[in-house]
Amino acid sequence: MPAHRSDRIRARSLRPQVASLEDRALLNAAMPHHGHAARPAAQVRVQAHPDHASKPAGPPIAVLGQAAAGGFRFTNFDLPMTGTNAGAGTNMNGIANNGTAVGFAIDNDGNFHNFAANPLRSNSAQALNINASTAAMAFAVNAKGVVVGTDGNGNAFTLSRGRVRTFIPNGGMSAIAFGINDRGAIVGQYTTANASPGFILAGRATTTINAPSGPNVVNAQGINGRGLVVGFYEGTDGQVHGFLASQNAARNNTLTGTAIADPTIPAVPGEPGATFVFSQVLGINDKGIAVGYYGDSTTSQHGFLYNTHTGQYTFLDDPSEAFSNGVEVTQITGITNSGEITGFYSDANGVFHGFVAKM
């Protein structure tokens, strides 16, 4: 998978397993969700666990090296407990404005081990105990250290000071939290009997985000300090596409997203004739710069930055990615107000590795 390796022989066979973000866990309203009866809006359960984040040092991360591309300097690394099989590895899923990133290691048995890390400041990671689950996934963190994600049992969660709080908004059947801003507003997706809309949870108020078009399947992925939400939705073509929504535009606790124009993708060496298939917008900062990735007809995935003011895309891959069975992957999953980004890429063995990068 590294981008731009035109000299590689690309005998395509199996795509590396992207056990990542749905690649980001796009929920489908038709999916059965056993054992999750309808609940009142944002019903919560709280459990206390040892506060791992208070420890001065944790298990070591493995820094793999640095590389430069597109004006960014990438620091590549693996979290503790990272597997070495194809489809295993490190997925970094979000980054706070203080530079702390969260994600999970996928071991060789497919279990998830969640951590927070800042490889530019420390070679240690902080283990995140999410009800001792190996199915839970941490997707985002804010500058106050509040982590959000899925507990692996159909519930969204927040983790703060060692306390896990699970919730499902609006009497839904299941939910995932994908983003949180420094004001504590949380975005994600919940399912009902016939839809999977997005949501914003701000204090006790929940706003539903509906799709611009197509079946109402919406993943709200990120929210900035100004209340601008980004994510993706399932279109009438059966593929996912980016959207924007403003928290301030909600009426009667409801919003409808605005479609983001799909990128006109560049030619990528080693992928002759590749065409656009889908895009996912995964994070946004207070300056209105969003990040995400697109998928093409080779099933490869490539990162981008998107300026919400101008509509301009800037394409960017980790320079250490490599083709594996004809597929290369870079996902940019989060961005800070200073422009530092995080995400992950795949190597020649189909193993994922995390990165942070700054200009």
Image (cartoon, helix red, strand yellow):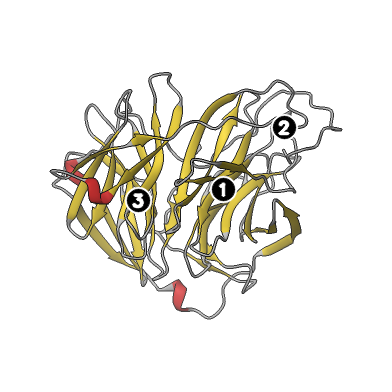
Horizontal and vertical percent position of residue 325: 73, 29
Mark 2 nearby-residue class (10 Å; few <14, some 14–19, many ≥20): some
Distance between mark 2 and mark 3 Cα atoms? 31 Å
Question: Which is more N-terminal, label 2 or label 1?
Answer: 2
Q: How far separated are the C-alphas under marks 1 and 3? A: 18 Å
Residue 48 is at least partly visible in this image: yes
Camera-side residue of 240 and 286: 286
Can residue 168 be seen? no
Q: Going 50% across and 66% down the picture, which residue do you hit?
A: 127
Measuring from the top left, give residue 130's x and y in whole percent: 40, 59
| Identity of the residue drawn at 41% across and 69% down | 145
Task: Name the mark nearer the viewer: 1 or 3.
Answer: 3
Residue beneath disc 3:
228
Rendered position, 133 above or below 175: below
Residue receiving disc 2: 268
Label 1, on which residue? 332
> What is the quadrant of the C terminus in the image?
bottom right
Q: Residue 182, image x and y in percent? A: 36, 65
Q: For the residues marked 1 and 2, what is the alpha-carbon distance in whole angstroms? A: 17 Å
- Name which of mark 1 and mark 3 comes first in the sequence: 3
Q: Does dot 1 land on a helix, a strand or a loop? A: strand
- Which structural element holds mark 3? strand
Q: Residues within 10 Å of mark 1 (few under 14, many from 20)?
A: many
Q: Identify the secondary structure beneath mark 2.
A: loop
Residue at 20 percent of width and 45 percent of height: 250
Q: Are marks 1 and 2 in contact (CB under 8 Å)?
A: no
Q: Is residue 215 above or below residue 344?
A: above
Residue flagged by tag 3: what amino acid is it?
Answer: Leu
Left-right relation of 5 to 202? right
Q: Quadrant of residue 142?
A: bottom left
Q: Nearer the viewer, residue 184 or 151?
A: 184
